[in-house]
Amino acid sequence: MTENEIAEERDLDKAVLASVIRDRQDEAQVTEYLDELEFLATTAGIESVKRFTQKLTTPNSRLYMGPGKLEEISGFVGENGIGTVIFDDELSPSQTRNIEKMLQCRILDRTNLILNIFVQRARTAYAKTQVQLAQYEYMLPRLTGLWTHLERQRGGTGTRGGAGEREIETDRRVIRNRISKLKEELKKIDRQMAVQRGNRGNMVRVALVGYTNVGKSTIMNLVSKSEVFAENKLFATLDTTVRKVVLDNLPFLLSDTVGFIRKLPTQLVESFKSTLDEVREADLLLHVVDISHPNFEEHIEVVKQTLQEIGAGDKPVFLVFNKIDAYSFVHKDEDDLTPATKENMTLDELKQSWIAKANTPCIFISAREKINIDKLRRDLYVMVREIHSGRYPFNNFLY
């Protein structure tokens, strides 16, 4: 069944979510992951209707989930006219083909969903080129599934292939050529951007980094007093924005970059590495964290890991814990003798936990409510001044 035929019978804008619960994963963590997957779906314009999970030691190599669970999903999507099933992992090409045969609907894995969002969000020619490259690299090993309707066109007895296979090979060649062309285009743009960065001189560079949707663009607007697009959706910012900021006569460059996320597709990390040159060349990273998120500690680790992958893991970091206005905790009863958890900590108690022992400069703010923003500017000024005075020891009269 083609996608057009599916669209006639089912609603492609409605989806069910599916995930495997692995060993050592508790259901609360899986719920958190599916909440994020649902937010991704919403950002892509898809409504999540129901969730399906299954406990497995490892995902099924053929079907990702067990055949019985997929039969259950198939029954639900068929009865309710659901057109899309989204899986919270990257599926192999063979898994995708096998699942499509069973479910007879559109299958999206986490990687494909994120790529679709990037397609929607890309605004500049540079971002569009990067996303196209990531899409083609994702698509190349999965072409066979796109041509299953040509199987009936294959040659007769004794032949090893036919029109369908020849068309697949033709398409592969076209896509490989397109990938090569896009890579050349990116190299050309990279050289132009390198010249632009070089023309900025030796000004101190500060880069905002963090998990997606933590408020980086809002902080950018507050510190630089500019208007950078900010929205309560994942990946609201794809293109790097650089602004010149002056604090008490001390100038520096502040950049806002694409947010990171758990299981960020390899294709996107590779194609966006050039965009993230602003991060690699920064003198200081403002790592913004949504402290109101129940999984903010894991988000910190995801960002650290991604910074390592792009070669920026050794940069000085200033932790900015944002959204303190949305922080909440569960009061622990006095007669409850079980050890306190993060969920039971007040904000003051949390500040005195591992955060106080981490020996990393930090601040607690609310960008939305403008809480502690003046202190953020003062602390940032002190850090930039230290870097600037080390670079220009005879220019300290500026401050």
Image (cartoon, rainbow, N blue to C red):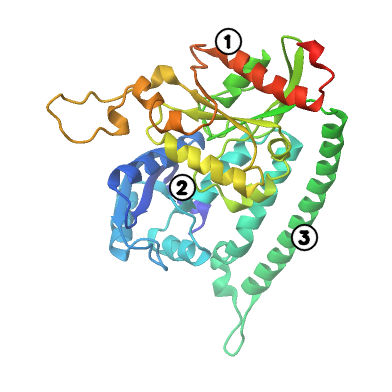
Element under label 1?
helix
Please indicate, yes or no, whether residue 261 appears anywhere in the rendered image: no
| Residue wearing tag 2 | 8
**Which tag, 2 or 3, sits closer to the chain's start?**
2
**Frontmost residue, 19 versus 218:** 218
Q: CA distance from mark 3 to mark 1?
A: 52 Å
Element under label 2?
helix
**Frontmost residue, 197 versus 174:** 197
Q: Residue at x 59, y 77 (%)?
A: 154
**Frontmost residue, 358 versus 117:** 358
Left or right: residue 152 versus residue 331 is: right
The numbered disc on residue 132 is: none
Left or right: residue 310 versus residue 92 is: right
Q: Residue at x 51, y 32 (%)?
A: 359
Q: Which amino acid is tagged 1?
A: Asp
Please indicate, yes or no, whether residue 390 appears anywhere in the rendered image: yes
The answer to whether marks 2 and 1 mark residues whose Cβ atoms lie closer than 8 Å is: no
Q: Position of residue 306 (x, y in %)?
A: 58, 45
Q: Residue at x 48, y 12 (%)?
A: 369
